Amino acid sequence: MLNEDVINEARTLWQKYFVLTKELLKFSDQRDNDLFMDLVEQRERIITKLKALPENNYRESDECKAMIEQIIPMDKQIIYRARAWLNKARRQNIAVRSYDLIDSAGFRGTVFNRKY
């Protein structure tokens, strides 16, 4: 592969990575976890392809640096939203498990059946 071809391939992959990052940000607030995870997997495949490319200097170009400067804040927002979603899911799991513990300990209905 000629160096120019490698640079063009790197440019194309970075542009795809940028578009997928924007899509991830758009879907990070929604409830469609399957779509979100699919986008994450697509982005990982692009990273693998970028790493497999022969040495090139596209990443040092002004064009790529400008794209990366836009990607970094989006990535931070995606991570923040994913962590918030994960924390919320953990709290919900804890609440559900606490009800399971009460049921399994034989306390079901005892609070409501007591006469005061």
Image (cartoon, rainbow, N blue to C red):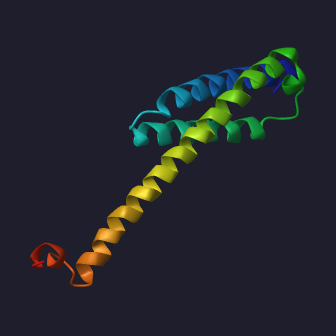
Q: Quadrant of the C terminus?
A: bottom left
Q: Residue at x 39, y 61 (%)?
A: 93
Counting every numbered tag in the picture gives 0
Residue at image point 88% right, 34% down: 55
Viewed as shown, does residue 14 lie left or right of 29? Answer: right
Q: Position of residue 99 (x, y in %)?
A: 29, 69
Residue with the most extreme front position: 116
Hey, which residue is sitting farthest top in the picture? 63
Q: Is 85 situated above or below 23?
A: below
The picture places residue 14, in percent across and down from the top left corner, at: 71, 25
Instruction: Tell me the quarter of the picture where residue 105 sits.
Output: bottom left
Name above or below for residue 53 compared with residue 3: below
Q: In the image, 8: left or right of 46?
A: right
Q: Position of residue 80 (x, y in %)?
A: 61, 40
| Image-quadrant location for residue 51 | top right
Residue 59 versus residue 30: which sits nearer the camera?
Answer: 30
Horizontally, residue 15 falls left or right of residue 5, namely left
Residue, x 69% and y 38% (percent of image)?
47
Give the image location of residue 33, x and y in percent: 42, 42
The N terminus: image quadrant: top right
* Quadrant assignment, res 97: bottom left
**Is 110 displayed left or right of 99 in the figure?**
left
In this view, which residue lies farthest toward the bottom?
A: 106
- Residue closest to the eye, 14 or 27: 27
Between 75 and 63, which is closer to the camera in this rendering?
75
